[in-house]
Image: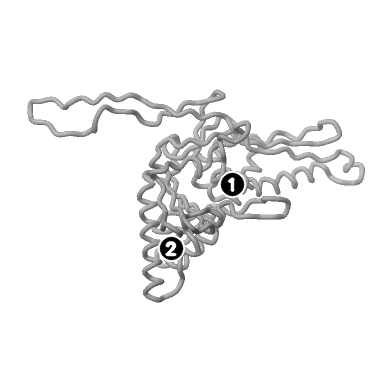
Amino acid sequence: MKFQTIAASDDLTQNMVQEILKYSPLLASYIEFFKKPGTAVSVRSGGTKSGIVGASRALGSDYSAKTVAPTYKTALRKLLGDTVKIDVAYERMGYDLASEMTSQLTQRMRDYGTIFNYMLINGNSKSEGAKEFAGLKELCLDNQKTVAATNGFSLTLGNSDAAKKQQQGFLELLDEAIGRCQGINKVIIANAKVKARINAIAREYINVERNVFGVPVAFYNTIPIIDIGDYEKAKDTYSPVIDFTETCGTSNDCTSLYVASFEEEQGVSFATCEGGFTVYPVQKNGNFLESTFELIADSVLVRGSALSKLEGLKL
């Protein structure tokens, strides 16, 4: 189920959810959640078997039975949010505090997709206190990763034979990464520069559609390409969520792209609960009016084949 479905039903939360979705195509259309109660949940992730399933038999004989055993993955409860507060003394100075709180909350909702995107890629479930959900960088299995070239693969522009060969080589690698990610609801996730380069060298395979909020979304061979965007690394200092800082062989200026199959309780999915995203009512606490907003969710890679990564890309 989508982000809006797992959010609390009160008017304040639902109004703020609309602001998040306007600025986050991933949360608006692709990320999938599932609800289960408890401080931790188990997710069926397939099973082990004693042999290859599927065989032939002669008429009048039985198949050789295969023993299967269910396996499960555990999702915990990670919380992602913040508290906004304003000193009540501003009211005596002529401010309309109710209006100001609504304005401040609305602005932070527009930034919330950026926070989620950062965690989606870089979340570290083994961080101090284990407060973060695992990002795609942590979740992706080694056998689902492809290094584009030993010392980095340049996404070359130009019409020369050498440039065309390089571009074709990249598109072949991209198609392999898409194929390796098995499932439905696939999404290519990259930084702005890689997305722009794909648009430039594969323009004949790109079409653009507007989502329900009027935001243009590019599709490569029917697969959406989402720019994961920037995050605020320090006050008023922004950096790409996926930057050109990865090392590949002798090159330390490389980046990666991911292909994820977001499926509810099947591919890359998020365990949450009733009212999984809530904006709590504004209330007075001491000298402040405050409101807290938070998402309760943990990432789960239910099937390892639902996520692939193409490493070693450079411009």
| Residue at 40% in and 51% down | 146
Q: Nearer the viewer, residue 173 or 259?
A: 173
Q: Which mark is residue 285?
A: none
Q: Residue furthest right?
A: 92
Secondary element at tag 2:
strand
Task: Indicate whether 13 appears above or below 312.
Answer: above
Horizontal relation, residue 39 to residue 292: left or right: left
Task: Indicate whether 142 appears above or below 67.
Answer: below
Secondary element at tag 1:
helix
| Residue at 75% in and 40% down | 84
Where residue 1 appears, as percent x and y from the top left, is 49, 38
Where residue 290 appears, as percent x and y from the top left, is 77, 36
Q: Which residue is mark 1?
A: 118
Q: Residue furthest front?
A: 250
Q: Marks 2 and 1, Cα distance to the nearest angstrom? A: 26 Å
Figure disc tally? 2
Where residue 124 appears, as percent x and y from the top left, is 56, 39
Q: Amino acid at mark 2?
A: Ile
Is tag 2's residue or tag 1's residue first in the polypeptide sequence? Answer: 1
Q: Nearer the viewer, residue 181 or 282?
A: 181
Horizontal relation, residue 170 to residue 238: left or right: left
Judge the density around disc 1: few (<14), some (14-19), many (≥20) Cα neighbours within 10 Å: some
Q: Which residue is mark 2?
A: 206
